[in-house]
Image (cartoon, rainbow, N blue to C red):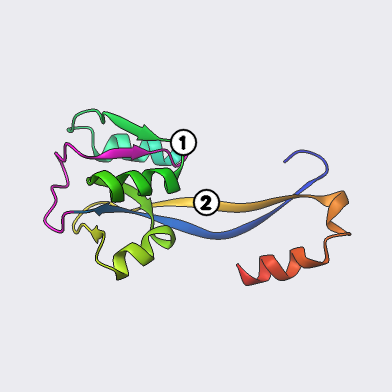
Amino acid sequence: MTQGQGQVDLTPDTLVLMSTDPAGSTRSDPGYVYVEAGEAFGRNHAVAYADTGTQRISFGNATTGLQHVLNVGGSAYLPLRLVQDALDKNLLFRLADVPEFKRSVFVIFNTDARDGWGWLDALIDAL
């Protein structure tokens, strides 16, 4: 951590394989998109799917990846908290019998500025 910065660990994200097809393939979906979720996810994903082909499309942001899958169809590993609304509306389906991954989530803040941010502690507590 850089001097002058503070960090609060939040509940880790659970990354789940979501698809627009409830009977979607977990190993060979031509519509699969890779959504970057950090180095640990990349390593674990490569091990879990070493026997599958390379994705044609990738995104560096889960929200953009989610919008692509909803607009075009296909599948992707996405944070469960981000896809809950699409699950509830049956726009996406959680594929069974596949690995799930965890991703650490943090709030990083400027320690000098924190004193003037009376709202920060309440926000962190709400998360």
Residue 46: x %, y % from top left: 30, 34
Q: Dot 2, crowdedness within 10 Å: few (<14), some or many (≥20)?
A: few
- Type of the residue with mark 2: Ser
Q: Name the residue: 88% across, 50% down.
A: 112
Q: Name the residue: 16% across, 54% down.
A: 21
Numbered badge on residue 39: 1
Count the marks: how many?
A: 2
Q: Which residues are magenta?
A: 21-39
- Front one among 9 and 76: 76
The answer to whether 26 appears left or right of 86 in the picture is left
Residue 118: x %, y % from top left: 83, 66
Task: Provide the secondary structure element on which disc 2 rests.
Answer: strand
Numbered badge on residue 61: none
Quadrant location of the N terminus? Answer: top right
Determine whether 112 is above or below 52 in the image: below
- Type of the residue with mark 1: Glu
Q: Name the residue: 14% across, 51% down.
A: 24
